[in-house]
Image: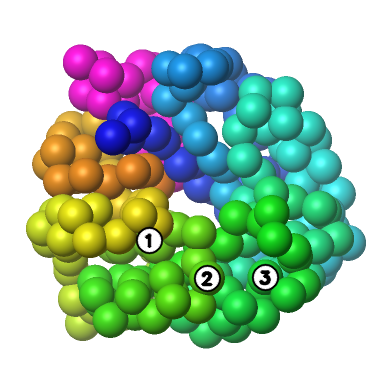
Amino acid sequence: MPPTQLYLISPLDVGGDFPARLERALAAGGKGQDALIAAFQFRVKGVDQHAAAALAAPLQAICAAHDVAFIVNDSVALAKRLKADGVHLGQEDGSPKEAREVLGREAQIGVTCHASRHMAMEAGEAGADYVAFGAFFPSTTKDKGPDAEVPEPEILQWWASLFEIPCVAIGGITPENCAPLVAAGADFLAVSGAVWGGDEVAAIEAFRKVMRP
């Protein structure tokens, strides 16, 4: 089984010096066989598509230079406009099947499945390329109601033992708490605050110590 990799999720503000921060983080992740970072999700709220495309352009170029997949959050239309590597869909953002029709065979399509085995199986049947479980820990990034069910690491183990489709763990993941998720078989750890909330290079190196002991 290939080792767990990081899936970076952007902060909501990707202007200013953020492109330089992304460049540093991806450089710290390394390249080739031992690359720690597999993907970057572009996640902005409340800006029109034109403004979003302008913000995305430099980030997409940085990802391409580092062989990191550039995934758009929520918007199939924006993913198509940018010729992004893929799109990440929430439960309300349409079906993987429809997204596939718009984005084509090569697109990476991921689906948020919260703590639901049923949603994950449905997503897989509809053609998702990966499923995301979470939030595993309290998170400011992951939108969820106060009553949202919190998944246990066992759900990753269950998924990995039955299905070929990769699974992503998301929600409040840090270098300090990620070891059980890696051990349970998460293919990817989706992280945002743990990286962008401080020194991004130090954070990537701290994740590496746990994920590549």
First in sequence: mark 1 vs mark 3: 3
Cα–Cα gap, marks 2 and 3: 8 Å
First in sequence: mark 2 vs mark 3: 3
Q: Is residue 29 left or right of residue 172?
A: right
Magenta range: 191-213
Give the crowd class for mark 1: few <14, some 14-19, many >=20 residues within 10 Å. many
Amino acid type indicated by mark 2:
Gly
Q: Residue at x 30, y 60 (%)?
A: 163
Is 194 covered by the magenta stretch?
yes
Say if 165 sits above or below 186 in the image. Answer: below
Picture coordinates of residue 9, whole percent (x, y): 51, 47
Q: Quick check: marks 2 and 3 in contact, CB under 8 Å?
A: yes
- Secondary-structure class at tag 2: loop
Q: In this orientation, does residue 177 appear?
A: no
Tag 2 residue = 127
Question: Which labelled disc corresponds to residue 132?
Answer: 1
Q: Residue at x 50, y 78 (%)?
A: 126
Q: Quick check: marks 1 and 2 in contact, CB under 8 Å?
A: no
Tag 3 residue = 100
Of residue 146 and residue 182, the one placed in the foreground of this image is 182
Amino acid type indicated by mark 3:
Arg
Q: Quadrant of residue 22?
A: top right
Picture coordinates of residue 117, whole percent (x, y): 24, 75
Q: Residue at x 33, y 75 (%)?
A: 121
Q: Is residue 78 left or right of residue 18?
A: right
Cα–Cα gap, marks 1 and 2: 14 Å
